[in-house]
Image (tube, rainbow, N blue to C red):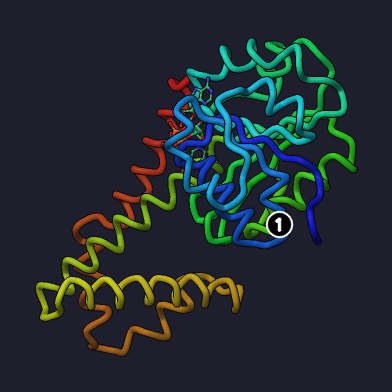
Amino acid sequence: MEVHKKIAVIGTGNLGNAIVEGMIESQKFSADNIIATRRQTHLIDSLQQKGVHTTSDNCQAVRESHIVILAVQPKQLEQILHEIADDLHEDHIIVSVITGVAIEQIGRLLSKPIAIVRAMPNTAIAIKQSMTCIAHRNVSPDSLSEVQSIFDTLGKTLIIDEELMAAATVLGACGIAFFMRFIRAASQGGIEVGFHAEEAQLIAAQTAKGAASLLLAHHTHPEQEIDKVTTPQGCTIAGLNEMEHNGLSSALIKGVKASFNRIADIT
Ligand SMILES: NC(=O)C1=CN([C@@H]2O[C@H](COP(=O)(O)OP(=O)(O)OC[C@H]3O[C@@H](n4cnc5c(N)ncnc54)[C@H](O)[C@@H]3O)[C@@H](O)[C@H]2O)C=CC1
Ligand SMILES: O=C(O)[C@@H]1CCC=N1
Protein backbone atom coordinates (compact mmCIF):
# COMPACT_ATOMS: atom_id res chain seq x y z
CA MET A 1 0.00 0.00 0.00
CA GLU A 2 1.33 3.45 -0.91
CA VAL A 3 1.24 6.17 1.74
CA HIS A 4 0.28 9.58 0.32
CA LYS A 5 -0.10 11.59 3.52
CA LYS A 6 2.54 14.18 4.41
CA ILE A 7 4.71 13.00 7.27
CA ALA A 8 6.93 15.19 9.46
CA VAL A 9 9.74 13.70 11.51
CA ILE A 10 10.52 16.11 14.34
CA GLY A 11 14.09 15.49 15.55
CA THR A 12 15.89 13.57 12.84
CA GLY A 13 18.72 12.00 14.82
CA ASN A 14 19.68 8.34 14.86
CA LEU A 15 16.18 6.88 14.93
CA GLY A 16 14.52 9.66 12.91
CA ASN A 17 17.11 9.19 10.17
CA ALA A 18 16.55 5.44 10.16
CA ILE A 19 12.78 5.95 9.84
CA VAL A 20 13.17 8.33 6.89
CA GLU A 21 15.77 6.07 5.24
CA GLY A 22 13.37 3.15 5.57
CA MET A 23 10.48 5.11 4.08
CA ILE A 24 12.55 6.05 1.07
CA GLU A 25 13.94 2.52 0.71
CA SER A 26 10.43 1.05 0.79
CA GLN A 27 9.37 3.12 -2.26
CA LYS A 28 5.90 3.31 -0.67
CA PHE A 29 6.45 6.95 0.28
CA SER A 30 7.38 9.80 -1.97
CA ALA A 31 10.39 11.69 -0.57
CA ASP A 32 8.35 14.76 -1.52
CA ASN A 33 5.86 13.92 1.22
CA ILE A 34 8.47 13.68 3.98
CA ILE A 35 9.65 16.63 6.04
CA ALA A 36 12.58 16.00 8.39
CA THR A 37 13.57 18.51 11.05
CA ARG A 38 16.81 18.95 12.94
CA ARG A 39 18.41 22.01 14.49
CA GLN A 40 21.59 21.52 12.43
CA THR A 41 20.06 20.68 9.08
CA HIS A 42 23.44 20.10 7.40
CA LEU A 43 23.61 16.87 9.40
CA ILE A 44 20.66 15.54 7.38
CA ASP A 45 21.87 16.73 3.97
CA SER A 46 21.99 13.11 2.83
CA LEU A 47 18.19 12.97 3.20
CA GLN A 48 17.77 16.26 1.36
CA GLN A 49 19.81 14.81 -1.50
CA LYS A 50 17.23 12.02 -1.71
CA GLY A 51 14.41 14.55 -2.12
CA VAL A 52 13.28 14.87 1.50
CA HIS A 53 12.37 18.37 2.63
CA THR A 54 14.73 19.21 5.51
CA THR A 55 14.31 22.18 7.80
CA SER A 56 14.98 23.42 11.33
CA ASP A 57 11.49 24.93 11.44
CA ASN A 58 9.39 22.48 13.45
CA CYS A 59 6.25 24.63 13.24
CA GLN A 60 6.37 24.79 9.45
CA ALA A 61 6.91 21.02 9.31
CA VAL A 62 3.84 20.48 11.49
CA ARG A 63 1.72 22.91 9.46
CA GLU A 64 2.61 21.12 6.22
CA SER A 65 2.04 17.59 7.44
CA HIS A 66 -0.73 15.26 8.52
CA ILE A 67 1.28 12.75 10.56
CA VAL A 68 3.84 14.11 13.02
CA ILE A 69 6.48 11.66 14.25
CA LEU A 70 8.14 12.92 17.43
CA ALA A 71 11.67 11.49 17.54
CA VAL A 72 13.50 13.77 19.96
CA GLN A 73 15.08 12.65 23.22
CA PRO A 74 12.73 12.45 26.22
CA LYS A 75 14.29 15.54 27.85
CA GLN A 76 13.67 17.57 24.64
CA LEU A 77 9.98 16.71 24.35
CA GLU A 78 8.40 19.33 26.56
CA GLN A 79 10.09 22.21 24.76
CA ILE A 80 9.17 20.77 21.34
CA LEU A 81 5.51 20.36 22.30
CA HIS A 82 5.46 23.89 23.61
CA GLU A 83 6.91 25.08 20.29
CA ILE A 84 4.51 23.22 17.95
CA ALA A 85 1.32 23.23 20.04
CA ASP A 86 -0.31 26.17 18.22
CA ASP A 87 0.25 24.54 14.83
CA LEU A 88 -1.25 21.21 15.79
CA HIS A 89 -4.95 20.69 15.09
CA GLU A 90 -7.34 17.83 15.44
CA ASP A 91 -6.70 16.41 11.96
CA HIS A 92 -3.10 15.69 12.90
CA ILE A 93 -1.96 12.33 14.20
CA ILE A 94 1.00 12.41 16.56
CA VAL A 95 3.24 9.36 16.61
CA SER A 96 5.68 9.41 19.50
CA VAL A 97 8.66 7.07 19.37
CA ILE A 98 10.02 8.64 22.55
CA THR A 99 11.01 6.28 25.32
CA GLY A 100 9.27 6.44 28.66
CA VAL A 101 6.75 9.20 27.94
CA ALA A 102 3.13 8.13 28.29
CA ILE A 103 0.38 9.16 25.87
CA GLU A 104 -1.44 10.75 28.79
CA GLN A 105 1.65 12.90 29.56
CA ILE A 106 1.86 14.12 25.94
CA GLY A 107 -1.88 14.82 25.90
CA ARG A 108 -1.59 16.80 29.13
CA LEU A 109 1.28 18.89 27.75
CA LEU A 110 -0.71 19.66 24.60
CA SER A 111 -4.11 20.09 26.23
CA LYS A 112 -5.76 19.63 22.81
CA PRO A 113 -7.82 16.73 21.48
CA ILE A 114 -5.30 15.23 19.07
CA ALA A 115 -4.85 11.55 18.24
CA ILE A 116 -1.65 10.28 19.86
CA VAL A 117 -0.10 6.92 19.08
CA ARG A 118 3.09 5.54 20.62
CA ALA A 119 5.34 3.46 18.41
CA MET A 120 8.53 1.70 19.36
CA PRO A 121 10.54 0.77 16.26
CA ASN A 122 14.21 -0.09 16.12
CA THR A 123 17.05 1.08 13.89
CA ALA A 124 16.52 -1.87 11.51
CA ILE A 125 13.65 0.29 10.25
CA ALA A 126 16.28 1.81 7.91
CA ILE A 127 16.24 -1.47 5.96
CA LYS A 128 12.53 -2.27 6.48
CA GLN A 129 13.31 -4.89 9.12
CA SER A 130 12.00 -3.14 12.20
CA MET A 131 10.01 -4.75 14.97
CA THR A 132 7.61 -1.97 15.86
CA CYS A 133 5.30 -2.19 18.86
CA ILE A 134 2.37 0.21 18.77
CA ALA A 135 0.13 1.43 21.59
CA HIS A 136 -2.72 3.91 21.68
CA ARG A 137 -5.49 5.26 23.83
CA ASN A 138 -8.84 6.23 22.34
CA VAL A 139 -7.55 6.64 18.80
CA SER A 140 -10.05 5.98 15.99
CA PRO A 141 -9.63 2.69 14.12
CA ASP A 142 -8.90 4.66 10.92
CA SER A 143 -6.11 6.70 12.52
CA LEU A 144 -4.62 3.62 14.14
CA SER A 145 -4.61 1.66 10.90
CA GLU A 146 -3.07 4.64 9.10
CA VAL A 147 -0.17 4.60 11.57
CA GLN A 148 0.13 0.83 11.60
CA SER A 149 0.24 0.70 7.80
CA ILE A 150 3.26 3.03 7.83
CA PHE A 151 5.18 0.71 10.13
CA ASP A 152 3.89 -2.40 8.35
CA THR A 153 5.78 -1.24 5.27
CA LEU A 154 8.93 -0.95 7.40
CA GLY A 155 8.98 -4.35 9.11
CA LYS A 156 6.70 -6.22 11.49
CA THR A 157 4.22 -4.59 13.87
CA LEU A 158 2.46 -5.64 17.04
CA ILE A 159 -0.28 -3.69 18.80
CA ILE A 160 0.29 -3.81 22.57
CA ASP A 161 -1.11 -2.29 25.75
CA GLU A 162 0.68 0.92 26.62
CA GLU A 163 1.72 -0.64 29.96
CA LEU A 164 4.03 -2.93 27.96
CA MET A 165 5.76 -0.11 26.09
CA ALA A 166 8.85 -0.07 28.36
CA ALA A 167 9.20 -3.83 27.96
CA ALA A 168 8.85 -3.44 24.18
CA THR A 169 11.52 -0.75 24.19
CA VAL A 170 14.00 -3.01 25.93
CA LEU A 171 13.31 -6.18 23.98
CA GLY A 172 12.80 -4.61 20.55
CA ALA A 173 14.66 -1.31 20.41
CA CYS A 174 17.57 -1.86 22.80
CA GLY A 175 17.58 -5.44 21.50
CA ILE A 176 19.42 -4.32 18.36
CA ALA A 177 22.39 -3.30 20.52
CA PHE A 178 22.19 -6.46 22.60
CA PHE A 179 22.26 -8.74 19.56
CA MET A 180 25.02 -6.64 17.99
CA ARG A 181 27.19 -7.22 21.06
CA PHE A 182 26.46 -10.95 20.84
CA ILE A 183 27.53 -10.95 17.18
CA ARG A 184 30.67 -9.00 17.99
CA ALA A 185 31.62 -11.43 20.74
CA ALA A 186 30.97 -14.40 18.44
CA SER A 187 33.18 -12.76 15.79
CA GLN A 188 35.94 -12.23 18.34
CA GLY A 189 35.74 -15.92 19.20
CA GLY A 190 35.83 -16.73 15.49
CA ILE A 191 39.06 -14.79 15.12
CA GLU A 192 40.61 -16.75 17.99
CA VAL A 193 39.84 -19.99 16.18
CA GLY A 194 41.24 -18.94 12.84
CA PHE A 195 39.22 -16.41 10.79
CA HIS A 196 40.13 -12.92 9.66
CA ALA A 197 37.88 -10.32 11.31
CA GLU A 198 35.82 -9.65 8.18
CA GLU A 199 35.18 -13.32 7.52
CA ALA A 200 34.34 -13.94 11.18
CA GLN A 201 31.79 -11.10 11.16
CA LEU A 202 30.17 -12.30 7.94
CA ILE A 203 29.81 -15.82 9.32
CA ALA A 204 28.52 -14.61 12.71
CA ALA A 205 26.03 -12.11 11.24
CA GLN A 206 24.63 -14.44 8.57
CA THR A 207 24.35 -17.21 11.17
CA ALA A 208 22.49 -14.90 13.57
CA LYS A 209 20.14 -13.96 10.71
CA GLY A 210 19.64 -17.66 9.92
CA ALA A 211 18.85 -18.49 13.56
CA ALA A 212 16.28 -15.69 13.81
CA SER A 213 14.79 -16.61 10.42
CA LEU A 214 14.34 -20.25 11.54
CA LEU A 215 12.25 -19.14 14.51
CA LEU A 216 10.15 -16.78 12.42
CA ALA A 217 9.63 -19.35 9.65
CA HIS A 218 9.04 -22.45 11.82
CA HIS A 219 7.33 -20.77 14.81
CA THR A 220 9.39 -23.08 17.00
CA HIS A 221 10.91 -22.57 20.44
CA PRO A 222 14.67 -21.81 20.37
CA GLU A 223 15.39 -25.03 22.29
CA GLN A 224 13.75 -27.10 19.53
CA GLU A 225 16.15 -25.55 17.01
CA ILE A 226 19.07 -25.96 19.44
CA ASP A 227 18.24 -29.68 19.82
CA LYS A 228 18.69 -30.08 16.05
CA VAL A 229 22.21 -28.64 16.25
CA THR A 230 23.55 -30.38 19.35
CA THR A 231 24.98 -33.70 18.18
CA PRO A 232 25.50 -36.03 21.18
CA GLN A 233 28.98 -35.58 22.67
CA GLY A 234 29.52 -32.95 19.99
CA CYS A 235 31.13 -29.56 19.97
CA THR A 236 27.89 -27.48 20.11
CA ILE A 237 26.76 -28.76 23.49
CA ALA A 238 30.30 -28.40 24.84
CA GLY A 239 30.32 -24.73 23.80
CA LEU A 240 26.75 -24.02 24.94
CA ASN A 241 27.30 -25.53 28.38
CA GLU A 242 30.54 -23.57 28.84
CA MET A 243 28.66 -20.35 27.92
CA GLU A 244 25.93 -21.18 30.43
CA HIS A 245 28.48 -22.05 33.16
CA ASN A 246 29.72 -18.49 32.58
CA GLY A 247 26.22 -17.04 32.87
CA LEU A 248 25.19 -16.30 29.27
CA SER A 249 21.41 -16.56 29.76
CA SER A 250 21.61 -14.99 33.19
CA ALA A 251 23.67 -12.05 31.87
CA LEU A 252 21.12 -11.42 29.08
CA ILE A 253 18.14 -11.60 31.44
CA LYS A 254 19.84 -9.30 33.96
CA GLY A 255 20.76 -6.87 31.16
CA VAL A 256 17.16 -6.73 29.91
CA LYS A 257 15.95 -6.06 33.45
CA ALA A 258 18.59 -3.34 34.03
CA SER A 259 17.51 -1.57 30.81
CA PHE A 260 13.87 -1.89 31.83
CA ASN A 261 14.55 -0.42 35.27
CA ARG A 262 16.46 2.49 33.70
CA ILE A 263 13.38 3.57 31.72
CA ALA A 264 11.57 4.52 34.90
CA ASP A 265 14.37 7.08 35.63
CA ILE A 266 14.44 8.61 32.13
CA THR A 267 11.60 11.12 32.52
N1 LIG B 1 18.05 5.20 18.77
C1 LIG B 1 17.20 4.18 18.84
O1 LIG B 1 17.51 3.03 18.42
C2 LIG B 1 15.83 4.36 19.40
C3 LIG B 1 15.45 5.55 19.98
N2 LIG B 1 14.17 5.69 20.47
C4 LIG B 1 13.75 6.97 21.01
O2 LIG B 1 13.78 7.90 19.93
C5 LIG B 1 14.15 9.18 20.39
C6 LIG B 1 15.36 9.68 19.62
O3 LIG B 1 16.46 8.85 19.92
P1 LIG B 1 17.81 8.98 19.11
O4 LIG B 1 17.49 9.10 17.66
O5 LIG B 1 18.66 7.87 19.56
O6 LIG B 1 18.37 10.37 19.66
P2 LIG B 1 19.18 11.49 18.87
O7 LIG B 1 19.72 12.40 19.89
O8 LIG B 1 20.09 10.85 17.90
O9 LIG B 1 18.01 12.22 18.03
C7 LIG B 1 17.27 13.29 18.50
C8 LIG B 1 17.38 14.39 17.48
O10 LIG B 1 16.50 15.44 17.79
C9 LIG B 1 17.12 16.63 17.42
N3 LIG B 1 16.49 17.76 18.11
C10 LIG B 1 16.56 18.07 19.42
N4 LIG B 1 15.88 19.21 19.67
C11 LIG B 1 15.37 19.60 18.47
C12 LIG B 1 14.59 20.70 18.07
N5 LIG B 1 14.20 21.63 18.94
N6 LIG B 1 14.25 20.80 16.78
C13 LIG B 1 14.64 19.87 15.88
N7 LIG B 1 15.39 18.81 16.21
C14 LIG B 1 15.75 18.68 17.49
C15 LIG B 1 18.57 16.44 17.83
O11 LIG B 1 19.42 17.34 17.18
C16 LIG B 1 18.79 15.00 17.40
O12 LIG B 1 19.26 14.94 16.09
C17 LIG B 1 14.43 9.05 21.87
O13 LIG B 1 13.28 9.48 22.57
C18 LIG B 1 14.65 7.57 22.07
O14 LIG B 1 14.24 7.14 23.34
C19 LIG B 1 13.26 4.68 20.40
C20 LIG B 1 13.59 3.49 19.84
C21 LIG B 1 14.90 3.22 19.31
O1 LIG C 1 18.91 3.89 24.62
C1 LIG C 1 17.82 4.45 24.60
O2 LIG C 1 17.39 5.05 25.60
C2 LIG C 1 16.97 4.41 23.35
C3 LIG C 1 15.65 3.76 23.59
C4 LIG C 1 15.70 2.44 22.90
C5 LIG C 1 16.90 2.50 22.12
N1 LIG C 1 17.58 3.60 22.34
Task: State which quadrant residue 248 falls in.
Answer: bottom left
Residue 62 screen position, x and y as percent:
72, 26
Q: Is residue 29 visible?
A: yes
Amino acid, disc 1: Asp
Q: Identify the residue at image location x=77%, y=53%.
A: 149
Please, is residue 61 above or below residue 189 in the view? above
Question: Dot 1: within a 10 Å radius of its alpha carbon, few (fewer than 14), some, or many (20 or more) residues?
Answer: some
Q: Secondary structure at mark 1?
A: helix
Residue 172 screen position, x and y as percent:
51, 49
Residue 124 screen position, x and y as percent:
50, 56
Nearer to the camera, 54 or 153: 54
Q: Is residue 164 visible?
A: no
Residue 16 screen position, x and y as percent:
54, 40
Please, is residue 252 above or below residue 140 in the view? below
Residue holding disc 1: 152
Nearer to the camera, 8 or 110: 8
In-image side of 86 versus 210 (left or right): right
Q: Identify the residue at image location x=86%, y=23%.
A: 90
Nearer to the camera, 237 or 12: 12
